[in-house]
Image (cartoon, grey):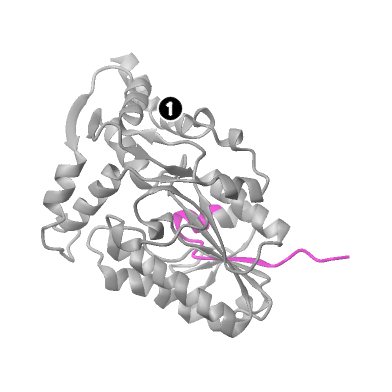
């Protein structure tokens, strides 16, 4: 009888890695303090040498106070430390980012990377360089790599732009984002989990496959604002936020190692909010036999917003 593959998630102490490790019932390798059953990356050599499937979720997201050097060290630098432990014939499922594709419309699995056009080019370039490094090491060490390129991730547990807007809304503050018709292409964490699970179960994708992971719909700033205000209920302070103008102004400022003073990275974040970029995940859905209707707006983003703001609704009713 065939045995179950040994799945190991590296970076399981992060938002993405933790979610995938739980969903895949995988062994957990962490970079921070260990908890029950976890293995620290410095003691993970023996485990990774036995692993059939390694899911790599390490590395920083776009964060205040970080520069290209920080992103490079946390992505290619950290990954290169354990790549020599991957056995011949194993599969590395690498969580890359749709940011490596840059700006554009209809960006899909076969689109050419253009990371310098992403608002946080330092982050996107570091992610793309890590992809290139893994492509080279796959050939040298004879393990297989599948790249997942998710859009901005979100879930009931938070993370990313959606979480930022909801935290403000819980304080009765909403941002009136401009351009009003700029589209956001997000990715629910459940979709990323579904994609990862199916890639592992089917085990038939060619080496160096690249899969864009994004919800089967886009949402504009106007629509996002309306959903938040509808779920919030009652009065709230509305603050106009011309993201294009704010981004242009702040991105010409100096970068600071102090997160409180790093207004340049804040400008890059506003640049992401203003970025009208649309991905094409249709081939990913088709290859993995995923029904897009399972991840419709009513089943993903709307419930996240409504559940996050339920306490605010109750407070408004009591008032």
Q: Is residue 65 left or right of residue 40?
A: left
Residue 183 place in picture, x, y as percent? 35, 38
- Asked whether 5 falls inside the magenta stretch, the response is yes
Can you identify the residue that label 1 sits on?
Answer: 306
Residue lying furthest right: 1
Residue 168 place in picture, x, y as percent? 27, 35
Q: Is residue 32 above or below residue 285?
A: below
Q: Secondary structure at mark 1?
A: helix
Residue at image x 35%, y 56%? 102
Q: How many marks?
A: 1
Residue at image x 66%, y 50%? 288
Question: Which quadrant of the structure image shows residue 142?
Answer: bottom right
Q: Nearer the viewer, residue 47 or 243?
A: 243
Q: Is residue 56 left or right of residue 32?
A: right
Question: Which quadrant of the structure image shows residue 1?
Answer: bottom right
**Crowding near the residue tagged with mark 1, few <14, some 14–19, many ≥20 C-alpha atoms within 10 Å:** some
Residue 37 place in picture, x, y as percent? 59, 65
- Asked whether 197 falls inside the magenta stretch, the response is no
Residue at image x 18%, y 36%? 241
Residue at image x 66%, y 74%? 90
Residue 308 place in picture, x, y as percent? 41, 32
Q: Is residue 106 above or below residue 165?
A: below
Q: Is residue 73 left or right of residue 285?
A: left
Q: Nearer the viewer, residue 5 or 200?
A: 200
Q: Nearer the viewer, residue 71 or 118?
A: 118
Q: Is residue 198 above or below residue 310?
A: below
**Image quadrant for the C terminus?**
top left
Q: In this picture, which residue range is highlighted in magenta?
A: 1-19
């Amino acid at each position: 009888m065939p045995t179950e593959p040994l799945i190991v998630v590296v970076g399981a102490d992060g938002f993405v890695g933790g979610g995938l490790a739980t969903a895949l019932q995988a062994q957990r390798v962490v970079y921070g303090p260990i908890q029950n059953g976890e293995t620290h990356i410095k003691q993970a050599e023996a485990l990774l040498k036995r692993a059939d499937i390694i899911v790599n979720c390490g590395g920083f997201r776009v964060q205040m106070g970080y520069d290209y050097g920080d992103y490079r060290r946390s992505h290619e630098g950290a990954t290169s430390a354990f790549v020599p432990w991957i056995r011949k014939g194993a599969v590395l499922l690498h969580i890359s980012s749709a940011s490596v594709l840059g700006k554009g419309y209809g960006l899909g699995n076969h689109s050419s990377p253009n990371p310098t056009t992403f608002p946080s080019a330092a982050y996107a370039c570091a992610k793309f360089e890590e992809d290139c490094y893994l492509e080279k090491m796959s050939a040298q060490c004879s393990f297989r790599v599948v790249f997942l390129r998710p859009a901005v991730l979100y879930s009931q547990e938070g993370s990313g732009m959606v979480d930022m807007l909801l935290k403000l809304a819980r304080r009765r503050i909403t941002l009136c984002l401009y351009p009003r018709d700029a589209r956001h292409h997000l990715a629910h964490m459940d979709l990323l989990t579904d994609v990862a699970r199916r890639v592992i179960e089917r085990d038939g994708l060619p080496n160096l496959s690249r899969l864009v992971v994004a919800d089967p719909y886009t949402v504009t700033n106007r629509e996002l604002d309306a959903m938040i205000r509808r779920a919030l209920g009652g009065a709230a302070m509305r603050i106009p936020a011309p993201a294009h103008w704010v981004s242009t102004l702040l991105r010409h400022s100096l970068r600071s190692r102090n997160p409180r003073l790093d207004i340049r990275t804040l400008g890059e974040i506003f640049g992401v909010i203003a970025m009208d970029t649309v991905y094409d995940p249709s081939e990913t859905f088709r290859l993995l036999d995923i029904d897009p209707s399972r991840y419709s707006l009513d089943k993903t983003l709307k419930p996240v917003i409504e559940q996050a703001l339920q306490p605010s609704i109750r407070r408004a009713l009591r008032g």
